Image (cartoon, rainbow, N blue to C red):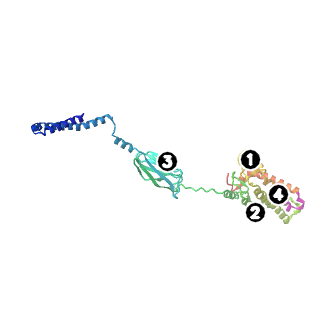
C-alpha cells in the first residue's frame, strides 16, 4: 500500500509539472507545486519510519531467546579440547601401561588414562588449565607444567621421560642351589658330638638344598680325614685288641695297627661308597634329616625307616639304594684286609648286617640324643 500511494503522488506531481509548463498556468503552478512537494515528503517519511516497525514485528514473532550469534558463541565456548602425549624411558623406548592423570587446576577434577602399546595417551576435556602426571612401577613420577586448553584446542605434551627410581630400585639376587647347599654344609661341619666327634651327616634343615657330586665327595673326605673320626677308629681298634678280635692279627703294636687299619678301612669305605659314590649314581641325599616333632613312636619309626627310604636330589622320598647296597659293598671290600679266615660271603653278609644295625642305632641316637649333646648345631 505505501508503494501505491507513493506512485499516485509521483504521478500527480508529473502531471502538474506538465500543466505548469504553460504560461497561462504559472500562477496555479506556484500554488500547487509546493503542496505536492509537502505531500510527497510526508509519504516518503512514513515509508522510512515504517521499515523498523515491520522488522520489530518480525523479531517479536521469532519468540524469546538469544540472538543466533550469541548462541553460537556460547556453544563454541564449551567445545572440548584434546590433550595427547607419548611416554618414553631414558633410552627412548616407549612405556606401555604407564598411568596418566590429567588434573584440572580450577576444580581439581581428575581424568585418568593408560598408555597403550606405543606409549600413547589422549584426553578429550573441557577448556581450562590442566596439569598432567605420569607414573609407572619402578620409575620416577613425571609432572608437566600447566597446560592451557581453549575451546577446540589441540595440545601435545612433549618430552615425557620416566627415569629409573633409584630410591625404590631393588636388585634381588637369588643364589644358586649349589651355593645354598655350600652354606648349609659349612654349618653342618661345625656340628660335633661333645665338641669332638664329627656329626656332619645330619641336617636340622628339613628342606635343605641337595648336594652336588663335588659336595658329596668333599663331605666324605672331610668326615674320613677328621681327627675325631680317626680317634673313634682308634678306640674301636683298642676294644678289639682287648677282646682279641680277629686273632690272626695277634697282639702287640703290630696287631693293634692291623686292627686300626681294618677299623679305619671299614669307616672310610662305607663313607665313600654309601655317602658319595652310590648317592651320586642314584642321585640321592646321604644325610639324615632330623624330624624333631611328633610322638616318640612316630619319630622312632621315622628314624628306622630311613635305612630303607631316603630323600632324592629332587626332594622326593625314594628307596634308599645307597645305604643298602653301600653296606654290602663295604662288607665285600673288607675281604681285602681282613685275615683269610674271616673272608668270604659270610664276612660280607655279616659286615652288611652289622652296618645296617649300626645305621638303625645311629639314626635313633640322631633323632633323640645327638642334637642335645652336639655343639655348633644350627637350623631347625
Q: Residues within 10 Å of mark 1 (few under 14, many from 20)?
A: some
Residue 113 - label: 3
Q: Helix or strand or loop: what does disc 4 sit on? A: helix
Residue 368 seen in render: no
Placement of 294 over or under 1, stated as above or below: below
Q: Quadrant of the N terminus?
A: top left
Q: Check residue 299 in the rendering and tell me which mark sits there, or answer none.
A: 1
Give the crowd class for mark 3: few <14, some 14-19, many >=20 residues within 10 Å.
some
SS at badge 1: helix
Q: Is residue 363 left or right of residue 37?
A: right
Q: Which residues are magenta?
A: 331-344
Instruction: Tell me the CA gap for discs 1 and 3.
Output: 61 Å
Q: How far separated are the C-alphas under marks 3 and 4? A: 72 Å
Q: Position of residue 305 (x, y in %)?
A: 77, 48
Q: Nearer the viewer, residue 284 or 296?
A: 284
Q: Nearer the viewer, mark 1 or mark 3?
A: 3
- First in sequence, mark 1 or 2: give its number: 2
The residue at which mark 2 appears reads as: 225
Amino acid at each position: 500500500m505505501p508503494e501505491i500511494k507513493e506512485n499516485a503522488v509521483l504521478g500527480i506531481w508529473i502531471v502538474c509539472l506538465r500543466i505548469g509548463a504553460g504560461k497561462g498556468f504559472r500562477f496555479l503552478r506556484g500554488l500547487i507545486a509546493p503542496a505536492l512537494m509537502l505531500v510527497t515528503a510526508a509519504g516518503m517519511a512514513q515509508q522510512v519510519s515504517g521499515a523498523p516497525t515491520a522488522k520489530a514485528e518480525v523479531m517479536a514473532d521469532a519468540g524469546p531467546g538469544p540472538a543466533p550469534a550469541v548462541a553460537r558463541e556460547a556453544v563454541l565456548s564449551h567445545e572440548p579440547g584434546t590433550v595427547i602425549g607419548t611416554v618414553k624411558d631414558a633410552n627412548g623406548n616407549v612405556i606401555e601401561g604407564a598411568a596418566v592423570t590429567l588434573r584440572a587446576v580450577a576444580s581439581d577434577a581428575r581424568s585418568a588414562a593408560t598408555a597403550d602399546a606405543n606409549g600413547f595417551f589422549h584426553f578429550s576435556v573441557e577448556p581450562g588449565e590442566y596439569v598432567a602426571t605420569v607414573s609407572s612401577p619402578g620409575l620416577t613420577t613425571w609432572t608437566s607444567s600447566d597446560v592451557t586448553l581453549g575451546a577446540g584446542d589441540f595440545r601435545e605434551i612433549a618430552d615425557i621421560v620416566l627415569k629409573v627410581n633409584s630410591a625404590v630400585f631393588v636388585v634381588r639376587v637369588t643364589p644358586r642351589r649349589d651355593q645354598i647347599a655350600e652354606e648349609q654344609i659349612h654349618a653342618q661341619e661345625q656340628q660335633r658330638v661333645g665338641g669332638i666327634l664329627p656329626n656332619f651327616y645330619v641336617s636340622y634343615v628339613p628342606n635343605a638344598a641337595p648336594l652336588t657330586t663335588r659336595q658329596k665327595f668333599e663331605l666324605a673326605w672331610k668326615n674320613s680325614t677328621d681327627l675325631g673320626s680317626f680317634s673313634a677308629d682308634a678306640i674301636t681298634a683298642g676294644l678289639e685288641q682287648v677282646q682279641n678280635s680277629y686273632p690272626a692279627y695277634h697282639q702287640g703294636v703290630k696287631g693293634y695297627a692291623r686292627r686300626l687299619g681294618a677299623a679305619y678301612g671299614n669307616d672310610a669305605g662305607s663313607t665313600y661308597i654309601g655317602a658319595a659314590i652310590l648317592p651320586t649314581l642314584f642321585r640321592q641325599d646321604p644325610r639324615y634329616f632330623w624330624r624333631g616333632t611328633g610322638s616318640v613312636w612316630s619319630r622312632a619309626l621315622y628314624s628306622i625307616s630311613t635305612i630303607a627310604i631316603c630323600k632324592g636330589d629332587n626332594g622326593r622320598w625314594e628307596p634308599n639304594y645307597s645305604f643298602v647296597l653301600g653296606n654290602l659293598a663295604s662288607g665285600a671290600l673288607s675281604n681285602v684286609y681282613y685275615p683269610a679266615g674271616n673272608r668270604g660271603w659270610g664276612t660280607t653278609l655279616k659286615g652288611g648286617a652289622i652296618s645296617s644295625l649300626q645305621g638303625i642305632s645311629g639314626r635313633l641316637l640322631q633323632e633323640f640324643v645327638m642334637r642335645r649333646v652336639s655343639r655348633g648345631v644350627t637350623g631347625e
